[in-house]
Every structure is written in C-alpha cells, then in structure tokens.
Image (cartoon, coloured by chain):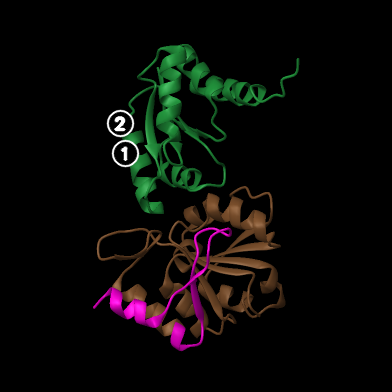
Chain colours: A brown, B green
C-alpha cells in the first residue's frame, strides 16, 4: 500500500510537515518512524504531543512503522523518517512503498550538497542507491507546491566520486 | 528580573527584538535564536546555549509556531531547568508587555499575564 507520503526530513516533525504538507494532503494520521525517538521517553513525549490541527501524531519504531506501511490505512498516512538508512530498513522489514520524498537533509560534516535543501553523506547516497535498486522511486521536493525532482542513481554516484 | 529568548523561523526573532527596542526602549530583555539552516540538533543546541547565558529570576522562551522545529527544539533544550517556561504564538504585544514589566512580576504571574495579553491583541478592527 503506497502511503500518502513517505518523507525523509532530518528535522522530523516541524512546520513544513505539520502545517504545509499536512494542510495540503489532509492525512488521517501522521507517523514519525524512528527507533531513536520511539525508544527515548522524552523525545517520544515531545513529538507525540505536538499540536496538529489536521491529524493525530504517532511515534512508532521502525518495526511497527513497517507494519503500518502494510496496512490499508497507510494510504491516508503521512510517514516521516530522519535518514535514508531508516527508510531502507523500513523497506527491508517489508514496508510496502514504491516512492519516497527527499524533503530536507541539512548540510554538515561529511555531507555534500545535492540540492539546496538536500545534503548527503556517502552512506546516505549508498542507502538511496539501494532503495532505487529495490524499485523505490526517489523524488526531491521540499514543499508540496514545488517541482518534484527525480533523483537518479548516476547523480548519487557522481556526488561522492 | 526575568529575561526572554525569542526562537523563530528565519529572521523573525531579530525583527521582533528590534521592534521591541523601538516601542519599549529595552534592548536587553531578549536573546534571539533563528532556526535558519539548522538541523534539529543544531537548533536545540542554539537554544540551550541561549538559556545557559541567562542567570535570572526566570526565563520565558517565546516561540512562533506551536508545532514547528523551534517549539520542538525548545522543549528538548529544557533539560532539567526549572525556571524556564515556553510560550508559543509570539507577537509584538506580548514582547513589549514583557519588556515593560519583567522587573515587577514573578515568572508564574508573567506567564499568566502574557497568555492573556497575547490572545487579547488579536482582534478585528472596524471603524
């Protein structure tokens, strides 16, 4: 079941997700899929209690989120992960999706810019290439009104050559 | 005396602080934090650093959007600090009121007052 949106964003849940994307897509549910957040009581409580006028927020570890991605309700769910690695693991765990949105990965040590809003480490590139090989389309798009930019394996290879 | 930290998207915090200085004449009430170009952890670290520099009777963190990265990072930056409160939906009326009365009120009384003043400043004007 292809989810309403599966987004990679290192800020996780924030204004662009809870206000802009949620306002346009009107999901029935928002799932933050992260082992790190799900297993940290403080971070879990902070994210799970964020106010969102559109939909309820759930924090799930990757195993639970992969199960949610196989459920029919996924079609009305907006999923957010923090890294390409987490999305690859969701797919390896049987999460059912064929498209992922690359929405925001900030610059940092050991990262190179692919687009103004997407900087990738060598491992990020390898994980995205693995997703492409598994038949998952990768699009870069920060906001719903922006143009969708398909991300190709050749670009990812060239970024770290 | 109470102190404030304004945490917003883009350059809004600096603009609000400048506006407070023009209206209330107080240039020391607030420290600005912007989330520009920051990862979630970088925003949290900026706010924590701003809070570490405040050694007062209490600090109020003024945030723009309740569900935004600034709000999340403010909550995560709190740690075990017990003299810090977070208010969202910051507007100029709240900040001017804070600047004018921050030497008079306790932290609890100020929070209660600003929640009322902030909401009361949003109204439709008609002739």
Q: What kind of element bears circle 1?
A: helix
Residue at position x 32%, y 35% from top?
Answer: B52
> Which residue is labeled 1 in the image?
B49
The answer to which quarter of the image holds residue B118 is: top right
Residue B116: x, y in percent? 64, 23
Which stretch did the figure color magenta?
A: A132-161
Q: Are marks 1 and 2 in contact (CB under 8 Å)?
A: yes
Residue plotted at (49% across, 72% down): A139
In the rendered image, residue B90, in percent from the top left (x then y), is placed at 54, 31
Question: In this rendering, is residue A143 above or below B121?
Answer: below
User: Residue B106 location in percent, x, y?
Assistant: 49, 18
Q: Quadrant of the N terminus of chain A?
A: bottom right
Quadrant assignment for the C terminus of chain A? bottom left
Q: Residue at x 29, y 78 (%)?
A: A158
Residue A53, percent from left and from top: 68, 49
Q: What residue occupies the far front of the structure in this picture?
A: A147
Q: Which residue is mark 2?
A: B53
Instruction: Label 2: state its secondary structure.
Output: loop
Left-right relation of B111 to B57: right
The answer for which chain carries disc 1 is B
Tell me the crowding category of disc 1: few under 14, some 14 to 19, or many 20 or more residues within 10 angstroms, Cα based: few
Dot 2: within a 10 Å radius of its alpha carbon, few (fewer than 14), some, or many (20 or more) residues? few
């Amino acid at each position: 079941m292809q989810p309403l949106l599966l987004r990679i964003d290192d800020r996780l849940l924030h204004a662009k997700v809870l206000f802009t994307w949620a306002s346009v897509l009107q999901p029935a549910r928002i799932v933050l899929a992260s082992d790190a957040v799900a297993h940290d009581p403080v971070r879990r409580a902070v994210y799970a209690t964020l106010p969102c006028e559109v939909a309820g927020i759930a924090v799930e570890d990757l195993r639970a989120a992969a199960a949610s991605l196989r459920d029919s309700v996924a079609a009305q769910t907006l999923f957010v992960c923090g890294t390409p690695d987490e999305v690859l693991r969701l797919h390896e765990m049987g999460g059912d999706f064929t498209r992922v949105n690359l929405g925001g990965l900030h610059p940092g040590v050991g990262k190179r810019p692919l687009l103004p809003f997407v900087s990738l480490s060598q491992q990020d590139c390898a994980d995205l290439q693995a997703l492409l090989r598994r038949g998952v389309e990768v699009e870069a798009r920060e906001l719903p009104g922006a143009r969708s930019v398909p991300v190709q394996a050749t670009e990812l290879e060239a970024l770290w050559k | 005396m109470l102190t404030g930290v304004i945490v917003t998207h883009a350059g809004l915090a600096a603009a609000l602080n400048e506006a407070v200085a023009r209206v209330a004449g107080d240039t020391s009430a607030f420290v600005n934090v912007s989330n520009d170009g920051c990862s979630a952890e970088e925003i949290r670290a900026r706010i924590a650093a701003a809070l570490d520099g405040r050694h007062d009777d209490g600090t109020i963190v003024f945030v723009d959007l309740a569900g935004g990265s600034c709000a999340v990072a403010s909550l995560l930056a709190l740690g075990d600090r017990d003299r810090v409160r977070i208010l969202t939906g910051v507007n100029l009326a709240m900040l001017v009121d804070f600047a004018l009365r921050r030497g008079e009120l306790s932290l609890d009384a100020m929070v209660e007052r600003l929640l009322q003043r902030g909401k009361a400043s949003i109204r439709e004007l008609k002739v």
